[in-house]
Amino acid sequence: MFSDLSRRCRWLCSAIAVVFWCGLTGVVALAAGKDAPPRPVTQRGELAADEKATIALFERSRDSVVFITTREQVRDLWTRNVFSVPRGTGSGFIWDEAGHVVTNLHVIEGASEATVRLANGRDYKASLVGVSPSHDIAVLRIASGQKRLQPLPVGTSRDLRVGQKVLAIGNPFGLDWSLTSGIVSALNRSLPGEEGGRTIEHLIQTDAAINPGNSGGPLLDSAGRLIGINTAIYSPSGASAGIGFAVPVDTVNKVVPQIVRHGKYSVSGLLSAPLTVSAALPAMRYRVRWRAE
């Protein structure tokens, strides 16, 4: 009996010692945690020259890029009432100080109204000036009042070289004013229209990430000049696969002034043939994404 009692006492003392030790180490750890300093921060030094150039380009160009939202009118089948519902989103850019905004036709196609949001967060109702279906270009206009608009500087596309750095600013998936970069992957690409629609030619191919919502936004060179309008992508998933296309600025600079002046684009007095666009155009085994939704 004495031996059994002794074992029980030793067991009880051991248990008390363990509990005491755990409590003591917990208190010590807690006390130490209060005074534990964070790891020292390593200073990074100056940004690289190309980083500084990209940051400066974005800060110069941001105010010239706009976020476009569209709505369409639908009729209730039961009440026959007509009401407005959201349709999609896209990008665009300021063309001139008169308030003209350039985007893709497929961004606004089928919409009953469009709203343009500037980089300062202010929204403006847009009116349609005109379109060129053959080039997937549309021109809107906003009345900004006393707000001085900042147009993008216009470059050239005829002298672009494969391998040249390019940057895209837009609103992919509604994530406004996003910047991506890449290179000119190829030149003079062509994309067929749907069901025999007219082919868009002389497109710039780029690997800069372009996603739904980037449509209508600017493609810029390393000097911050407009060199194209982001228009379509090849993609098996609907998201960027590194193959995007932009309407070259030499075409834009020929088409847009005529739309601004006449409300349409014509060649030798004849209207250009229409281009039918849709949510997904078949091209080989991939999809060409035209819509900005």
Image (cartoon, rainbow, N blue to C red):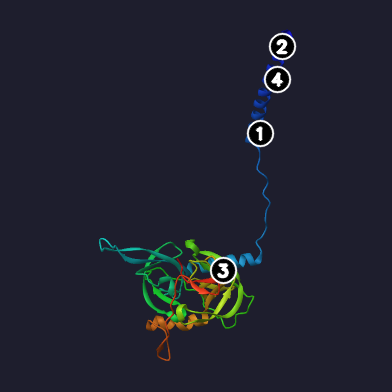
Disc number placed over residue 57 in the picture, else none: 3
Question: Are the residues tagged 1 and 4 within 8 Å (C-beta)?
Answer: no
Cα distance in 3D space between marks 1 and 2: 42 Å
The earlier-in-sequence mark between 1 and 3 is 1
Q: Is residue 176 visible?
A: no
Residue 5 coordinates in the image, percent (x, y): 70, 10
Cα distance in 3D space between marks 1 and 4: 27 Å
Where is mark 4, residue-wise? 14
Q: Quadrant of residue 125?
A: bottom left
Q: Secondary structure at mark 3?
A: helix
Q: Amino acid at mark 2?
A: Asp
Cα distance in 3D space between marks 1 and 3: 48 Å
Question: Are the residues tagged 2 and 4 within 8 Å (C-beta)?
Answer: no
Disc number placed over residue 32 in the picture, else none: 1
Vertical side of 107 occupied by 3: above or below: above
Q: Amino acid at mark 3?
A: Leu
Crowding around mark 1 (Cα neighbors within 10 Å: few <14, some 14 to 19, many 20+) is few
Crowding around mark 2 (Cα neighbors within 10 Å: few <14, some 14 to 19, many 20+) is few
Give the residue at x 59% y 67%. 54
Position of 220 with respect to 197 (left or right) is: right
- Name the foreground residue: 138 vs 277: 277
Q: What residue occupies the far front of the structure in this picture?
A: 285
Crowding around mark 4 (Cα neighbors within 10 Å: few <14, some 14 to 19, many 20+) is few
> Which mark lies nearer to you, 1 or 4?
4
The earlier-in-sequence mark between 1 and 2 is 2
Q: Amino acid at mark 1?
A: Ala
Q: Secondary structure at mark 1?
A: helix
Q: Quadrant of residue 209?
A: bottom right
Residue 238 coordinates in the image, percent (x, y): 52, 66
Where is mark 2, residue-wise? 4
